[in-house]
Amino acid sequence: MKRTALCIMCAVCLLFAGVPAQAKTAELKVSLPDTVKGYTPCEIVIESPAAGEAELKLLDGSKNLWMTRREQVAEGKNVLAWNGLGVNGERMFAGPYRFQVTVRTADGQEYTTVRKFTINGTTPTLVYALPNSETLYLDGREPWFVEVFVSAESLIAMEVLDSSGQRVYYRDDKITDPDGSIIRWNGAINSYKKIEPGEYTVRMWGKQNPDYLHTFTLKAEAQSPAKRAVEVTGPVIPERGMSDAEIWEIMMKPSVVINASGSFRRFTLYSKPSKSCRSAGSLRCALQGLEILDIEGSWAHVRAGRHEDGTLVEGYLQLYDLTVYTPAAHYGVLIDKRDQTLTVYHDGKAIGSIPVSTGLAPKGKLTRETPPGAFLTDVHTGASFAQDGFRYEYPLRYDGVNYIHGVGFTRKGRARDYSKNLPLLGQKASHGCVRVGLFAQEDSPLNMYWLWIHLPYHTRIIVLDD
């Protein structure tokens, strides 16, 4: 009897000896609504068998990574807030998604589970509000406007507060255009009075979803500055190996461009200061920056990448065709065709680099080569466009014919298939535009959506030749 009891006790001891401190049968559970809307609060509930770090990866139906989120969780129930958006606040388009959740404990245990769900639409929200300038000139000679984009038809509120926080101006604008709109303001409070010169704060939001508030400062000045004269610029394109400070100094130089009243015509570059001389090529107007080598009477001796093949050439333009713009103050972009990278600078410092695809020019189609040079971004021209069977999202025009935009996709039912263009990032592949990835990256905060919501009108874009 004693021997039988002893054998049973030994068997029980051996059984428990084979079970680790954290039971292998413990289960990680994750729940959230079956259907989620963008810009709309919801809860992710994690029931964890142990305390540790939870890693949540948001994947679409093609396993593209849209977000990685890490949170410390306790043993038991944990509730995380989520708004149905990606890593940079991007809208997730309708379709199937999943959260792949892993909890790692301090003692090396790991628990993993997957929760599938559907994203279906968005709450109407103000996605971005990008002013074209930090200064509003009250004489009206320099137009001031805000570019806005909404996730769905929205009533947009705009209020202006003075330095004491008192409201001096308010308006509502109904935004229905799915490709974005421009809200213009000349500083008028009413039909006979304008705000006083001084420092102001502008607040903008969608009235259906006021939690997404956009705030920026605005300086009002009585008089526009005198028109800047065209002068010798020095180099407008940095060299590889320059410091951040050196690159930033070049980025922030005034930009001399051909003025064509908002059109994107090409202008002849003459080999000598006379219209009777032969052409050295043609140049884009409005956004292409020119290096001014010299001023010769009524002519400017310039250097720039010609439209025909992107080759840097010298020639002459008449001074009355030229005007000078000041680049937007806080961001600049450097695209290196040799390395196929895009680097963003913020207030003088590089904040991240990502791979891109610039133009692949087959024989006889040199216009598909991405031209080198110094450019300025235009107003946002839409949320997407189609070409050759692909759709490209978040386009930013920067030289009249070329854009920076997301990699192209095709549709398979509700799913988006990026598999044709996504693997080509890091090598030439486009028709001349600059393609950028849309998905979350571990080593950089940047993706195409980030560029689209951060880079305002007249941001400097510099393209280094290869």
Image (tube, rainbow, N blue to C red):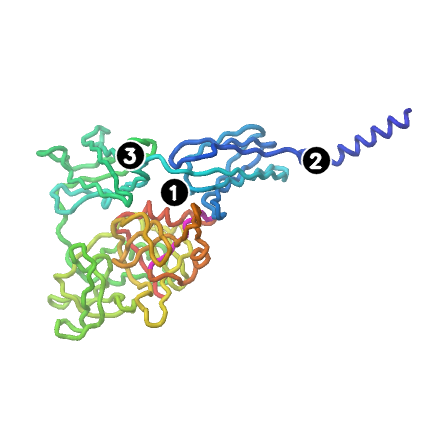
Amino acid carrying mark 1 in the image: Glu
Work out whether residue 196 or residue 341 is closer to the camera in this orientation and state it. Answer: 341
Amino acid carrying mark 3 in the image: Trp
Q: CA distance from mark 2 to mark 1?
A: 42 Å
Vertical position of residue 415 compared to residue 18: above or below: below
Is 440 colored magenta in this rendering? yes
Vertical position of residue 284 compared to residue 89: above or below: below
Left or right: 240 as drawn, with respect to 282: right
Q: Residues within 10 Å of mark 3 (few under 14, many from 20)?
A: many
Residue 245 visible in the snapshot: no
Q: CA distance from mark 2 to mark 3?
A: 54 Å
Q: Secondary structure at mark 3?
A: strand
Is 262 colored magenta in this rendering? no
Classified by dominant secondary structure, the portion drawn in magenta counts as: loop
In the picture of the structure, the residue carrying the numbered disc 3 is: 205
Q: Which quadrant of the structure image shows residue 186? A: top left
Vertical position of residue 69 compared to residue 388: above or below: above
In the picture of the structure, the residue carrying the numbered disc 1 is: 90
Left or right: 56 as drawn, with respect to 436: right
Q: Secondary structure at mark 2?
A: loop
Q: Which quadrant of the structure image shows residue 248? A: bottom left
Q: Which mark is residue 20?
A: 2
The quadrant of the picture occupied by the N terminus is: top right
